[in-house]
Image (spheres, grey):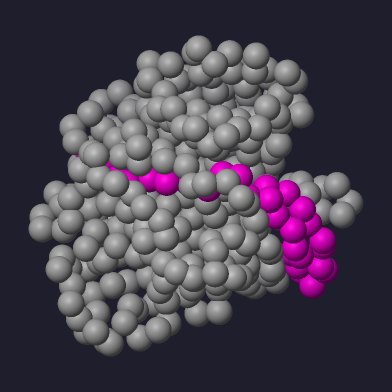
Amino acid sequence: MNARALLTALFLLAPLPALAQGFAGLGETNGTYAPVTPGTAITFPRDHGAHPGHRIEWWYVTANLTDDTGAPLGVQWTLFRQANAPDDTGTGWASQQYWMGHTALTTAKAHRHAERLARGGVGQAGVDAAPFAAWIDDWSFESTDAGFSPLRLSANGDDFSYALTLATDAPMVLQGEDGYSRKSDRGQASYYVSQPFFTVTGTVTLDGTPRTVTGRAWMDREWSSQPLAPDQTGWDWFSLHLDSGAKLMLFRLRSNDRAPYFAGNWIAPDGTSTALSPDAITMEPLATAPVAGRTLPVEWRLAVAGRDLDVTVTALNPDSWNGTSFPYWEGPISVTGSQG
């Protein structure tokens, strides 16, 4: 099929030495934090909620939208949780849980982002499993009834805001091998689940002008205590919605000393998730651009052997830099090429 007809995908392509090694010490040994082990059963609604025994966790939503003029845009909403000490039993201000929220709105000509920071234990930020609710200050992602879906998603920053409804009847998708996602060949891993089947309706407001939007969204959930190896310095992540109804997640983790570590899952329209062999994955930067004083890849070739996928992805807005406390690139892409 013509990949120009693929729904615009959202991806994270991030030179992340700060985020990878600084935030929550992701490349450090896990000490006495809760381990990540293969074969652990992931169940819902329990695992929609927080896992305070693990060092790092996130609820990550990326939405691919079209406004009422047909223009594409992207939205990001992310809540990070960090445990500052293992076996945290503190309450109130003694809690050792810390929270960080990021949001962004991207069009072809504009990229806006905002950040929130909060201390755990005092109600400023948190996550409830059932009914599901994640929040930091007045930003929220929460179920609207007793089930998980539909959900309301909202956030705001300087000169932008959005209020969206996300809905699906599809089950959660287990990434990696039954939710156990390897991040290196030396034992680093996370628990990783996704919901890539959301449909979206709502409103975004940019520079005081509201726009009615529709589209699709992808939610990622990961929790771990040491998801990266000490030498890993960056994370490039892509998600694609295919015309066939299938979904594709790919990532590579870069290292100063070793070849990149590749992983991905092919998700069938019924939600069946199959881990891809690293040898089947090609992620090749094709073009770069100056962004925030850095030179970053903004066009890539992605290919998956055995799935007849070979596409080129290009950033909708190369200047999609989140200049937050732990900065990174995040934004929507256009797709050309073929699959099948």
For residue 230, side relative to residue 144 (left or right): left
Establish if 333 lies above or below 213: above
Q: Position of residue 72 (x, y in %)?
A: 76, 46
On-image quarter of the N terminus: top right
User: Between residues 85 and 284, which one lies in front from this camera angle?
Assistant: 85
Q: Position of residue 282 (x, y in %)?
A: 47, 19
Q: Quadrant of residue 263?
A: top left
Magenta residue check for 214: yes
Which residue in the rendered view is the most extreme toward the front? 146
Q: Which residues lie in the magenta part?
A: 188-216
Q: Quadrant of residue 143?
A: bottom right
Q: Position of residue 92 (x, y in %)?
A: 28, 87
Q: What residue lies at 53% left-to-right and 36% top-to-bottom? A: 271
Which residue in the rendered view is the most extreme toward the right? 69
Q: What residue lies at 37% left-to-right and 58% top-to-bottom? A: 47
Magenta residue check for 53: no
